[in-house]
Image (cartoon, coloured by chain):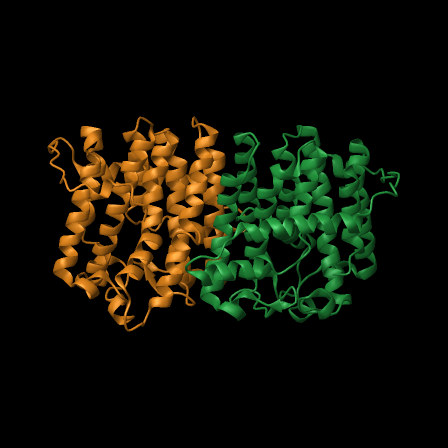
Chain colours: A green, B orange
Amino acid sequence: MPNNGHQLNPMVSQLQIDTTFDLSTYLKEQKALVEKALDNSITIIYPEKIYEAMRYSLLAGGKRLRPILCLATCELVGGNIEMAMPTACALEMIHTMSLIHDDLPAMDDDDYRRGKLTNHKVYGEDIAILAGDGLLAYAFEFVAAQTKNVLPQKVLEVIAKLGKAVGAAGLVGGQVVDLDSEGLAEVSEETLSFIHTHKTGALLEASVLCGAILASASQDSLDRLSCYAQNIGLAFQIVDDILDITATTEELGKTAGKDIAAQKATYPSIWGLEKSRSQAQILVQNAKAELEVFGEKAMPLTSLADYIVSRTN
Amino acid sequence: MPNNGHQLNPMVSQLQIDTTFDLSTYLKEQKALVEKALDNSITIIYPEKIYEAMRYSLLAGGKRLRPILCLATCELVGGNIEMAMPTACALEMIHTMSLIHDDLPAMDDDDYRRGKLTNHKVYGEDIAILAGDGLLAYAFEFVAAQTKNVLPQKVLEVIAKLGKAVGAAGLVGGQVVDLDSEGLAEVSEETLSFIHTHKTGALLEASVLCGAILASASQDSLDRLSCYAQNIGLAFQIVDDILDITATTEELGKTAGKDIAAQKATYPSIWGLEKSRSQAQILVQNAKAELEVFGEKAMPLTSLADYIVSRTN
């Protein structure tokens, strides 16, 4: 994780709470916009099966956290939702691709995802592999072809960042180390940190940064947002690990208790539940502290940070 | 296949043969340039296994036809090799990804490729899936981040074209129909044509067009090159089908006789060997006719067209 100094800031955010901001309504509205754009992004043509398989997983619900983060940072630094929507959709296509491939029998071998049968359980392994490939390729095509009213150089920066976040230097690399660590008697905190900063952190950070890049954010803003993203990314993963222990399969929409069953190293397994919870809280406070300079405009992002530690699925 | 009128041109190319042009030397030189750029494109860092798996298949030899076509069209319309090299490498990364995933047990289940064990036979299925994903993501990152001295808008056009060529509207869609057609008693010429224009044709056409786009080619040049590409793409596939019957596994570097074993519809199975050979010749003549306006500068591309029908592996 690059250290630009910001995450060492010990000051805890004391942002005044704007009582007019309702996160739940905000998330609902943004999610609806994203769902509509995703629905419009893929039309079913011949050969229908592949488009259906891509849509099956892409439109299977989920929090749409990555697209919402992307839209929020674009607006934060003076852009608008239209500029960022193709990238927001691409982030969800990439995230969905990673879920489809992670669920394959050769990988995590999971039957349920977001409360529904996994892609390969419905369409078969061959189509699931191809649906993932199709979504990944389409994500880049979609950003390149559909982004309007943004400097082309900024769109290229976004594409490079998306590619890096999902490739061997990001998500793919994190998954490799994760697979290698499964069932090991001991996994160091360093290895666990590598897994999470790559497997979930990289794409979350890209989500936060890409929205801002599209709106030509300053380097200082990008540095602050990068730090915000790294902190909420790690908090998100810690909470994920906690929920795997404390929540039911029904609440999660995916198999609960999997980490223990797979003897997977997690933050609770290293730190225990209590320390994991308090670390997540500290990370969220650090994340929020980075956004103070933006004032009330940052309310969606600070509320999202709080939501990450308080969520139950 | 879009019909822009060019492929209906009945005139057969009577280009004067420039006896100073030696295709074999040209291919050797261009291939060496591409191999060097590919070798430099991926450095092995932690987690080493994924980078090694990506390099294993990317540097496993092969004709490097797609990169060479891309470099050739860029030069043809006034660009230079440096402008097109990142895209040339990306084309080979995408092609390699498609081979790694096609060879998986859930797909064509093949043990050998380019005379070596397939990726999953060496690294396991999980890593092979991830190596493909990593190469696909890196291809887009590489074009976006490494292309120099090209208008950013042109780079975006190239990325959109690459994405379309590999996604459901291209390679992935062709593979889906191919898998569906395997073992069927009857496959129509229309279906076979869909498979090939998508599974091999789309990326070959992108190879030809992307080089020219980077050098800001005129629409007329792009139309001619598109037609050239469609003709050599189909000829290439017909020859592939012929070689699967007539060549040995050793000559091919991959399992020969696979199509018959899999009861796969091929051009020889529909037309017979003789008609397949003559159709390939006609397509190559049509391809060459499109390039007459470019004069001697088109020699690499016209020679490549001839090479496609005369190759033995």
Question: Is residue A42 visible from the viewing direction of this image?
Answer: yes
Q: Is residue A2 above or below residue A41?
A: above
Q: Quadrant of residue A275?
A: bottom right
| Residue at 71% across, 70% down | A249
- The answer to which of B60 and A86 lies nearer the viewer is A86
Q: Is residue B4 left or right of residue A310?
A: left
Question: Considering depth in this image, is A311 or B160 the residue closer to the camera?
Answer: B160
What residue is at 31 percent from the left and 40 percent from the top? B208
* Rendered position, B275 above or below B41: below
Q: Residue at x 64, y 32 (%)?
A: A215
Q: Position of residue B295 (x, y in %)?
A: 19, 29
Task: From the top left corner, tell me how far across and down residue A22 is, in percent.
Answer: 82, 47
Identify which residue, A251 or B193, lies in the foreground. Answer: B193
Q: Where residue B34 appears, x then y in whole percent?
A: 34, 39
**How many tags in the picture?**
0
Residue A233 x %, y %: 70, 48
Q: Residue B118, located in which quarter of the rendered image?
A: bottom left
Is any part of residue B310 visible from this angle?
Answer: no
In this rendering, would B302 be left or right of B137? left
| Residue found at x 48% / y 44% | A141
Q: Is residue A66 above or below residue B84?
A: below
Picture quarter with the C terminus of chain A: bottom right
Q: Quadrant of the N terminus of chain A?
A: top right
